[in-house]
Structure formats: C-alpha cells, structure tokens
Amino acid sequence: MNEEIPFAGYCSRVQAVIEDVYGIRVVTRDIPDPLTGDLDGAEIHIDYAVTPEQRLFLLAHLFGHTVQWNVQPETFELGQLHQPPVDEALMGAILNYERQAASFALGMLHQVNILDIDGWLSDYTQCDMAYLQHYYRTGETREFTSFWRDHAKLVEPLPIPPFVASKRVMRGDGLVI
C-alpha cells in the first residue's frame, strides 16, 4: 500500500464529483462491522473510522457499483449477500461484476484527472476480489491486507455512461467489502 498518494486530497475531489456531477449523496456514518461501506443506487455510505486510503477505494469502488446498478439493473442481484460456499458458476459472475465496478471507478478517477494511481487501484481491487473469493468459498474472514499483492494486472478504465441515480435499498443485509 502506498503512503505517497495524497489520499485525503483525492477523497475530497472524488466525493465532490460524485455528489456534484452525478447527484449521488455521500454519507459518513457508523456502519456495523464487518462492513465498511454501503450503497443503495442513489447514496454511498462510508464508515467514519476508515483511513483516507480505504475511503478513496470505497468512494471509487462503490461509485462503480452505483453506475452498474443504474445502467444494468440486473447487477443489483450480484451485489447482494450470497451464502458461502458460493457456486463456482456464480463466483465467475461476481468477479466480473467486481472487475467492471473497478473499471467504472478508474474511468471516474481519470475523468477528475487523477491519473497516477492506476496501479494502486488495480492492486486494491485484486486484494478485494481475493478477499471476497476466499470468503465466498470458505465463509472465513481474514485480515484484508493478507490478500494484498503488488503489481496486479492493471484495471482498464471504462467511460461513465449517462445515468440517473435511482434508490433501491441499502445493502446492510448484504456483504460490502
């Protein structure tokens, strides 16, 4: 994980774009463990206790899922809680869903001229996906950073399609990692 990235400054820029350009409200609040973030298609909620690095990932990543839910409504079901062990066929769809969210996240970061953290976002995304895969296969939660590997395959940015944010339900009953 990179200490040279100005995470707090990037968080401010990203949150401003999410709220001002896309009309998605960002709320900082206490989110019950083990969750650190939540979304409903029109709002993104982030736990008050996360680090600026975690916050930046959550802002970008949950924005990516928000885009998915609003332009591809069928993806909403992929983002809901799945009881481990998850069928391998479904696992592939979940991982594709996560990759696409990362691509929308990176597309938004590029849109706001944050061009120097593609590697960091790719590494963080790979860690998140490895954590999720492990959990869905075993039901076991481990320290998130134990899944961290540097130099992951770079995420390909996707442009953000036009959408109107539509509220669904918070995923508090689901798993947001």
Image (cartoon, rainbow, N blue to C red):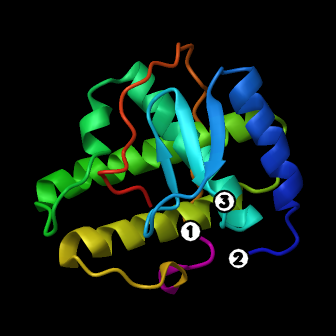
Displayed quadrant of residue 48: bottom right
Residue 82, compared with residue 60, is above or below; it is below
Q: Earlier in the sequence, mark 3 or mark 1?
A: 3
Q: Is residue 114 visible?
A: no
Q: Which of marks 3 and 2 is nearer the N terminus?
A: 2
Label 1 crowding class (10 Å Cα cut-off): few <14, some 14-19, many 20+? some
Magenta span? 146-151
Gap between marks 2 and 1 measured at Cα: 12 Å
Magenta stretch: residue 58 in it? no
Name the amino acid type tagged 3.
Tyr
User: Disc 1 marks which residue?
Assistant: 152
Residue 34 screen position, x and y as percent? 43, 69
Gap between marks 3 and 2 measured at Cα: 20 Å
Q: Is residue 117 visible?
A: yes
Name the amino acid type tagged 2.
Met
Mark 2 vs mark 1: give the one in front: 2
Quadrant placement of the C terminus: bottom left
- Measuring 76% from the left and 57% from the top, which residue is drawn there? 117
User: Disc 3 marks which residue?
Assistant: 48
Circle count: 3
Mark 3 vs mark 2: give the one in front: 3
Pick the residue in front: 54 or 168: 168
Q: Earlier in the sequence, mark 2 or mark 1?
A: 2
User: Disc 2 marks which residue?
Assistant: 1
Residue 99 screen position, x and y as percent? 44, 49
Label 2 crowding class (10 Å Cα cut-off): few <14, some 14-19, many 20+? few
- Measuring 40% from the left and 84% from the top, which residue is drawn there? 142
Q: Which SS type dominates the magenta stretch?
A: loop
Residue 118, compared with residue 17, is above or below; it is below
Residue 122 screen position, x and y as percent? 60, 60
